[in-house]
Image (cartoon, grey):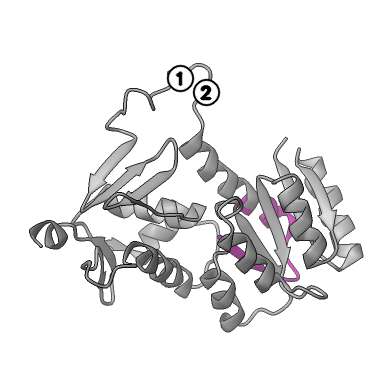
Amino acid sequence: MPRVLLIEDDMPLAETTQQYLEQFGFEVRHEEDGEKGLEAVHADPPELILLDLMLPGVDGLEVCRRLRMNPGTATIPILMLTARGDEADRVAGLELGADDYMPKPYSLRELVARMRAILRRVTTTTSATPETPDRSSSNSSDDVLNVGGLHIDRLSREVTHHGEPVELTVTEFELLWLLASRPGQVLTREQLLDQVRGREFEVFDRSIDVHISKLRKKLEANPKQPTLIKTVWGVGYRMDPDEEDAR
């Protein structure tokens, strides 16, 4: 049973959401404000956080920021829920590290689909089933990429850039893997959305741009390092390691 933490101050909505999710096999814990939510995460880290933006005291954006700043909670997937549906709020949440976003009122059926999509991405990149040999010890080329100073291990979800560890969210890791596995190839925003979230979801165009921007900042902390991820205007993005290798 996937363990989910719901941080929501609207009690009727929280109760309805919790009951619905439990019908689909989720183990849901509910907290009604940001401080209690943070305490719950640290006491018993969940596999996924559903986070309301408008919370009393510590709001959702601050909760997201604190979780992403802490190495122990930095990679827990966060799906933001908020009544404020304009693009600025969406961008703010994504820039702080949220993996996905749903405006209220939301469809509970779609919420389950999005949660499953996020958890599926985590599971497929971190777990080996009992029937599948543990390939991490053999350093399988299918699960490890070395591109332009990057070392990416899909099973352990570890990323280093020139030997320095890089902490990524679920969505950032998946985007990096997609681009690094196709060096030099341009991937459109539609292709990236399709691979990362699925076509059944209507995601506003800037979401991918925001995730790519955060990914670049984490990879290019050293200003002397060239840009690995290039923008192809009007099309999408590509990984361009040759420039760094030549440098």
Q: Amino acid at mark 1?
A: Thr
Q: Quadrant of residue 103?
A: bottom right
Q: Which residue is mark 1?
A: 132
SS for dot 1: loop
The extreme left residue here reads: 246
- Residue 41 located left or right of residue 75: right
| Number of numbered callouts drawn | 2
Judge whether residue 109 is colored magenta: yes
For mark 2, give the secondary structure. Answer: loop
Q: Is residue 199 magenta?
A: no
Q: Nearer the viewer, residue 12 or 140?
A: 140
Residue at horizontal 43%, vertical 35%?
155
Which of the image's four quarters has the N terminus?
top right
- Determine which residue is flagged by label 2: 129
Residue 17: give x, y in percent of width and height. Answer: 82, 55
Q: Position of residue 16 (x, y in %)?
A: 87, 56
Q: Does the CB distance between marks 1 and 2 fall below 8 Å? A: yes
| 197 to 1, vertically: above or below | below
**Of the residues shown, which amino acid type is indicated by label 2?**
Thr
- How far from the left and from the top, in percent, is residue 111? 69, 56
Q: Name the image quarter holding the C terminus.
A: bottom left
Q: Considering depth in this image, is 154 or 217 the residue closer to the camera? A: 217
Identify the magenta region.
99-114
What whole-number distance in Å separates the C-alpha atoms at marks 1 and 2? 5 Å
Q: Quadrant of residue 193?
A: bottom left
The percent position of residue 37, horizontal first and vertical second, equals 78, 59
> Does residue 198 appear in the picture of this structure?
no
